[in-house]
């Protein structure tokens, strides 16, 4: 994979791209401390991500590799599940080498440099989080031969790493990078609109989701340990499904609010 190299070519996103970056980060920095979980904010500081410039991925990686051994790797489009989880098992996170259009500043279904570099990479400056994702990648790679089982890991990733919430002494906070990187999604997730359920391995691994709209059902962690400590149990339960008769297979829970 070309992208394994440390010296990666970064697209010049021009003045329009820089303006979008500045607007999103400046806007978000006003509410971030009250909305997003502390390890995200600590990562932003550790990696020195700020509104003034779109960071060089090579500079970010120098810091990140020194902290936890992870790195961001530019990819051309959305990685399929096989490629994505393989990357996690190699301590790499895919980063879109483009920025959303100015009319989509608050939300984009396509992972761009704001979603990936600003939203995801700061979390990987935290060792416990980084270790969890590394183990998650490895574990998921063991289920690549069964798309239905792989899907359970995708849903799990979606409702925790992408769209999880977490309890803190100060109140509910955003844990998922998919929410953290979107000012619109942050406001929505912490409003009273979405249904918020306690973290539950079985509910999450069977819960369908859509990527093209705000998440109407979310799950909240009691603490980080609840997530980091559940991996063996998750694998054990998915393994049980591997051995089920087809007529006993559990039907996924439809997306909340989907009329289909
Ligand atoms: Fe993401």
Image (cartoon, rainbow, N blue to C red):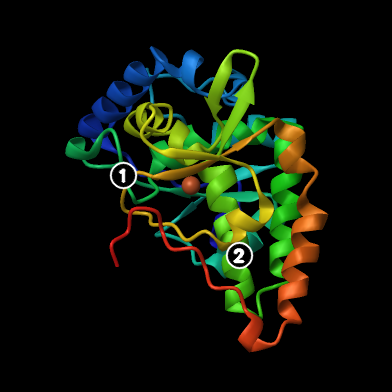
**What residue is drawn where x is 74% and y is 38%?**
226
Spot occupied by residue 206 in the image (x, y as percentages of width and height): 57, 63
Q: Which element is circle 1 on? A: loop
So how many labels did they put on this image? 2
> Can you tell which quarter of the image residue 190 is in?
top left
Please state which of residues 231 and 137 is positioned toward the viewer in this rendering.
231
Q: Tell me the number on the disc at residue 246.
A: none
Marks 1 and 2, Cα distance to the nearest angstrom?
24 Å
Mark with earlier residue (1, 2):
1
Please state which of residues 117 and 52 is positioned toward the viewer in this rendering.
117
Viewport quadrant of the N terminus = bottom right
Q: Residue furthest left?
A: 103
Q: Residue furthest bottom?
A: 246
> Can you tell which quarter of the image residue 209 is in?
bottom left
Q: Single out the mark in the foreground, 1 or 2.
A: 2
Spot occupied by residue 27 in the image (x, y as percentages of width and height): 32, 18
**What residue is drawn where x is 40% and y is 36%?**
114
- Specify few, some or many for label 2: CA neighbours under 10 Å numbering under 14, 14-19, or 20 or more: many
Q: Is residue 1 visible?
A: no
Please state which of residues 152 and 50 is positioned toward the viewer in this rendering.
152
Spot occupied by residue 47 in the image (x, y as percentages of width and height): 58, 24
Q: Which element is circle 2 on? A: helix
Q: Is residue 112 visible?
A: yes
| For residue 120, side relative to residue 22 (left or right) | right
Q: What residue would you read off at disc 1? A: 108
Viewport quadrant of the C terminus = bottom left
| For residue 12, side relative to residue 209 (left or right) | left
Q: What residue would you read off at disc 2? A: 152
């Amino acid at each position: 994979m070309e992208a394994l190299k440390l010296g990666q070519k970064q697209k010049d996103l021009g003045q329009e791209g820089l303006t979008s970056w500045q607007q999103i980060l400046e806007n978000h920095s006003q509410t971030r401390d009250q909305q997003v979980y502390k390890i995200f904010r600590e990562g932003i500081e550790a990696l020195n991500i700020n509104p003034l410039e779109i960071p060089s991925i090579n500079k970010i990686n120098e810091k990140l590799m020194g902290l936890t051994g992870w790195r961001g790797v530019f990819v051309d489009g959305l990685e399929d599940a096989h490629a994505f989880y393989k990357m996690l098992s190699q301590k790499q996170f895919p980063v879109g080498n483009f920025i959303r259009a100015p009319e989509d500043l608050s939300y984009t279904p396509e992972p761009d440099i704001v979603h990936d570099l600003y939203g995801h990479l700061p979390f990987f400056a935290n060792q416990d989080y980084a270790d969890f994702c590394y183990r998650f990648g490895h574990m998921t790679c063991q289920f690549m031969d069964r798309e239905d089982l792989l899907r359970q890991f995708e849903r799990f990733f979606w409702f925790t790493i992408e769209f999880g919430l977490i309890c803190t002494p100060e109140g509910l906070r955003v844990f998922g990078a998919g929410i953290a990187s979107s000012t619109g999604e942050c406001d929505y997730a912490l409003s009273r609109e979405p249904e918020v359920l306690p973290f539950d391995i079985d509910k999450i691994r069977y819960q369908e989701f859509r990527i093209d709209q705000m998440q109407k059902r979310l799950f909240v962690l009691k603490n980080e340990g609840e997530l980091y400590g559940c991996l063996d149990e998750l694998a054990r339960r998915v393994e049980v499904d591997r051995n089920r008769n087809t007529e006993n297979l559990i039907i996924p829970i439809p997306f909340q609010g989907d009329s289909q």
